[in-house]
Amino acid sequence: MEAWERKLLHTARGVFEVFMKGVGDPLCVTHHYSEFNETGDYFAETFTGTNQVFLINLREAGNSDKANESYELSMLETIFDLEAIREALGFRQWGFAGHSTGGMLGVLYGIHFSRSLDYTVIVGAAAREYMTFSKDCIYNEAHHDFGRMQEHIEALKQSGLSLDKRKELSVERTKLSLHKPEAYHELFSLNIHKGMSAARMNFFIRELQVFDVTRKLEHISVPSLIMCGRFDVQCPLKYSIEMAEGIPDSRLVIFERSNHYPFLEEADRFKDEYELFLNERK
């Protein structure tokens, strides 16, 4: 598989590590606390056949700049960083696609900077804190896999983990979010590996407790494709339904045989729905 091209991009808000691949209209992809490298990302790879994808390491991730103040790790400050990256790349507008916490960033991006976006693709995400009021969420103490998920997350935060141990923990964590866990090795068969920024993750856990932008969804004025697996245990389906009801120009697609990874679990349909969305905009 072709590697991603790496670039250290100097912006008005600092230096950010960006990975590029694909041909077509520009599409920004990121995740709130993942650390990417030249092997890319499964979600981002989905779009390289239709777009020039810019996969971004946010502040405190990979070789991007560190945070001088803790608030710089917030979701809103992250959107300001993405805007600086767009400007440095010379794009008047670009698309944004985000999965999970990346999708939450996409919601905020649309609320505050719709003028900078062609469209948003929001997959398996939410516009508010999704744990407290949903027993279907694996981060809710009432969920039967809550304890196992927490063990994996805490273990992954440890510094000095060997690559093999980190991979083993990541595999077990991911299996908890698959409709068919036994299909893991078939779905995740490419040479793609990424890390996690503990600093960003720890800040996010605190910020999430007060996150709710549902009453601002009407301010997203660009076409928005919202996709979610029927059995998503991380950001349950009801939160995607809620976003689709609140965003004026939105379309909701539900994947009936998917959990948190519809772009892998139902990959062909996912690509078809995205291409249909693009064609409808022409």
Image: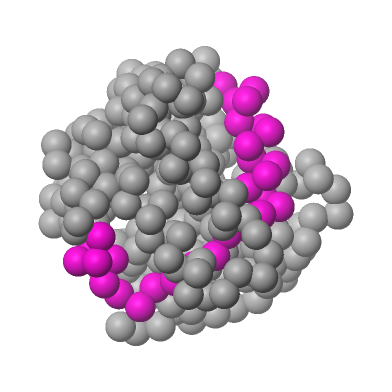
As drawn, 17 above or below 250: below
As rendered, which of 233 and 87 lies closer to the eye?
Answer: 233
> What residue is at 61 percent from the left and 31 percent from the top?
208
Residue 111 location, quadrant = top right
- The outermost residue toward the bottom is 2
Is 263 inside the magenta-drawn segment?
A: no
As rendered, which of 142 and 219 lies closer to the eye?
Answer: 142
Q: Position of residue 71 (x, y in %)?
A: 79, 41
Q: Position of residue 6 (x, y in %)?
A: 54, 79
> What residue is at 71 percent from the left and 52 percent from the top?
199
Q: Position of residue 154 (x, y in %)?
A: 59, 49
Q: Is residue 9 left or right of residue 223?
A: right
The quarter in which the N terminus is drawn is bottom left
> What residue is at 60 percent from the left and 69 percent from the top?
161
- Is residue 89 visible in the rendered image? The answer is no
- Is residue 158 visible in the rendered image? The answer is yes
As drawn, 64 above or below 99: below
Specify start and end residues of the magenta stretch as a single range.
184-213
What is the tally of numbered marks visible in this picture? 0
> What residue is at 72 percent from the left and 47 percent from the top?
73
Q: Is residue 23 left or right of residue 86?
A: left
Residue 3 location, quadrant = bottom left
Is 194 inside the magenta-drawn segment?
A: yes
As rendered, which of 173 and 272 lies closer to the eye?
Answer: 173
As drawn, 221 above or below 60: above
Q: Position of residue 66 (x, y in %)?
A: 78, 61
As drawn, 157 above or below 134: below
As rendered, which of 193 and 3 lies closer to the eye?
Answer: 193
Q: Is residue 150 left or right of residue 142?
A: right
Q: How is the image coloured?
A: one colour
Residue 46 location, quadrant = bottom left
